[in-house]
């Protein structure tokens, strides 16, 4: 465990804030320093890594320990963090207090990343595993998911096949209070536009107010959101 905590301290001390549409610059933003650090760390443990370009200046780092079966177990975690504005503690100076480590990304997602890296190191040190073990340290999870999208769209970039992704098992590390979560909500972003019709102010009934139409639509969206919350939750082991 102390190795996980040591590695977690190192990762938290490396700023890797998602630029959220801006340019990844050297001081605070982007995952480049994380990729380089993890690559060197895994290299010291004789684990092969491949970089995969996700989008401009942003890369995934994929490490593979070949097993007797090519059907992989994929451990996935992300290297970017949310922003640091409004934080009341020093974001990049990890502190342990009361058995917890504090700093930007300590929980989301560098805690699981450090645990997964050390798990892979331990697997590699124990000889050839029964199944191929893959660590996918993906970029850009907090904004556009370009990292994990690149991995599932072009696994051949890092020596994996679509078949391996389909038949393997994957575990994504995210803060869940140590509960196992079997489903994830999606996101779909729309741009809705309502159109009206102008009329002379002496007789507005001749026109159509686009704002009134939109307000009815917003009410319907609120009702729909409430109905989603009432749907049965996915159950562990249900597939
Ligand atoms: Zn996360």
Image (cartoon, rainbow, N blue to C red):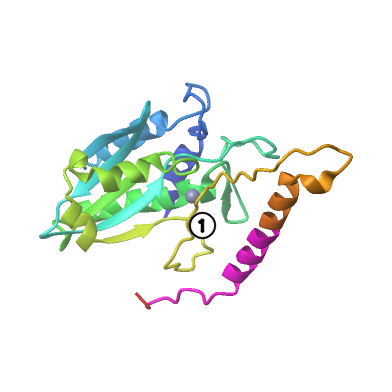
Circle 1 Cα neighbour tier, 10 Å, few/some/many (<14 / 14–19 / ≥20):
few
Residue placed at 58% from the left, 42% from the top? 103
The picture places residue 185, in percent across and down from the top left corner, at 49, 60
The picture places residue 180, in percent across and down from the top left corner, at 44, 68
For label 1, being within 8 Å of ligand 1 is answered yes
- Of 103 and 83, the residue lying toward us: 83
Drawn side of residue 147 relative to residue 155, left or right = right
Drawn side of residue 49 relative to residue 92, left or right = left
- Of 190 and 197, the residue lying toward us: 197
> With respect to residue 89, does 76 lie above or below?
below
- Residue 226 magenta: yes
As helix, strand or loop, the secondary structure at mark 1 comes to loop
> With respect to residue 235, does 23 lie above or below?
above
Residue range in magenta is 219-237
Residue placed at 86% from the left, 38% from the top? 201
Q: Quadrant of the N terminus?
A: bottom left
Q: Quadrant of the C terminus?
A: bottom left
- Of 52 and 202, the residue lying toward us: 202
Q: Which residue does the numbered mark 1 point to in the structure image?
A: 175
Furthest-top residue in this view: 26
């Amino acid at each position: 465990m102390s190795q996980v905590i040591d590695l977690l301290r190192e990762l938290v001390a490396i700023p890797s804030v998602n630029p959220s549409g801006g340019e990844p610059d050297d001081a605070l933003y982007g995952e480049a320093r994380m990729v380089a650090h993890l690559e060197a760390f895994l290299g010291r443990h004789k684990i092969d890594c491949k970089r995969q370009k996700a989008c401009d200046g942003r890369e995934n780092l994929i490490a593979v320990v070949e097993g007797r079966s090519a059907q992989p177990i994929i451990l996935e975690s992300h290297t970017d963090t949310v922003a640091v504005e409004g934080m009341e503690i020093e974001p990049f100076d990890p502190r342990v207090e009361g058995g917890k480590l504090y700093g930007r990304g300590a929980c989301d997602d560098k805690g699981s990343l450090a645990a997964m890296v050390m798990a892979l190191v331990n697997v590699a040190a124990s000889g050839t595993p029964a199944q191929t073990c893959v660590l996918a340290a993906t970029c850009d999870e907090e904004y556009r998911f370009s990292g994990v999208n690149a991995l599932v769209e072009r696994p051949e970039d890092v020596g994996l096949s679509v078949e391996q992704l389909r038949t393997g098992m994957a575990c994504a590390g995210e803060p869940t209070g140590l509960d196992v979560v079997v489903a994830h909500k999606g996101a779909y972003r729309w741009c809705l536009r309502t159109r009206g019709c102008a009329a002379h102010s002496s007789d507005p009934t001749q026109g159509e107010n686009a704002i009134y139409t939109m307000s009815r639509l917003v009410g319907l969206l609120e009702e729909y959101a409430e109905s989603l919350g009432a749907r049965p939750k996915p159950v562990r082991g249900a597939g």
